[in-house]
């Protein structure tokens, strides 16, 4: 014994301190990993958007009419813009490089609560033009990713009769993604 304490008690104190340090490290790593996934889904944090973008899924639809005959989407951008929609605990970001790229979109879906691998955008998406044409995707190329999924959503460049889908007279296009985590319709609209 030394000063009324045995060495076994002292060693036990070191074990407790090691466990506390290990627990603190685990908490710090977990917090860092969650912060790396983003904070858009946490209350009080606005979704990441660029100028001219707004969220169309989490709020009520706009009341103005657009040229496509539906409620005007407030998610409107110029060509080469990324647009964001949040709803159903999922953030969907869509980027379209513009008419020169053809009808090819980069779609990123992120969440902390839903497995996104079961959502096949080839079955859930459509592309509309302002003159009333609507087509389904020809391909959805996205690797499985669980809570984070990103890939290319491709539509046919021309209709069955050879007419270009996006012609020189097309003034706007709208990508519609339906039924992802309970959100009936997410609209992403670009003016040309």
Image (cartoon, rainbow, N blue to C red):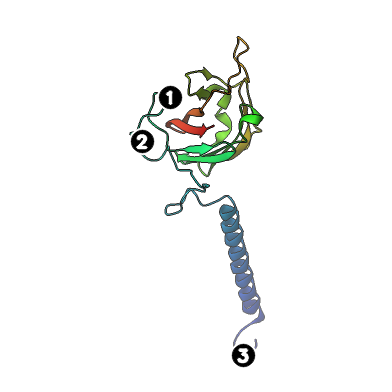
User: Looking at the picture, how far across and down is residue 58, in whole percent?
Assistant: 40, 40
Mark 1 residue crowding within 10 angstroms, few (<14) / some (14–19) / many (20+): some
For label 1, the residue is: 68
**N-terminal-most mark, 3 or 2:** 3
The front one of 24 and 130 is 130
Q: Nearer the viewer, mark 2 or mark 1?
A: 1
Which secondary structure lies at badge 2? loop
Name, please, the residue furthest toward the bottom.
3
Which secondary structure lies at badge 3? loop
Q: Is residue 160 left or right of residue 70?
A: right
Mark carried by residue 152: none
Name, please, the residue furthest toward the top.
161
User: Looking at the picture, how far across and down is residue 3, in whole percent?
Assistant: 61, 90
The front one of 131 and 59 is 131
Where's the N terminus, which quadrant? bottom right
Count of all numbered marks drawn on residues in the image:
3
Q: Residue at x 55, y 20 (%)?
A: 136
For label 3, the residue is: 3
């Amino acid at each position: 014994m030394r000063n009324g304490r045995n060495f076994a008690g002292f060693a036990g104190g070191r074990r407790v301190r090691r466990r506390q340090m290990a627990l603190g490290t685990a908490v710090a790593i977990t917090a860092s990993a969650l912060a790396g996934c983003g904070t858009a889904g946490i209350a009080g944090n606005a979704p990441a958007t660029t100028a001219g973008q707004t969220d169309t899924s989490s709020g009520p639809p706009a009341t103005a009419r657009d040229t496509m005959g539906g409620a005007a989407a407030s998610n409107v951008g110029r060509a080469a813009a990324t647009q964001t929609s949040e709803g159903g605990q999922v953030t969907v970001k869509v980027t379209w490089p513009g008419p020169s790229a053809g009808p090819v979109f980069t779609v990123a879906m992120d969440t902390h609560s839903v497995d996104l691998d079961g959502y096949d955008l080839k079955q859930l998406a459509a592309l509309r033009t302002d003159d009333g044409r609507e087509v389904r995707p020809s391909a959805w190329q996205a690797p499985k990713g669980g809570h984070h999924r990103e890939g290319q959503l491709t539509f046919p460049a021309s209709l069955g009769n050879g007419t270009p889908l996006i012609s020189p007279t097309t003034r706007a296009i709208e990508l519609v993604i339906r039924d992802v985590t309970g959100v009936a319709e997410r609209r992403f609209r670009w003016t040309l």
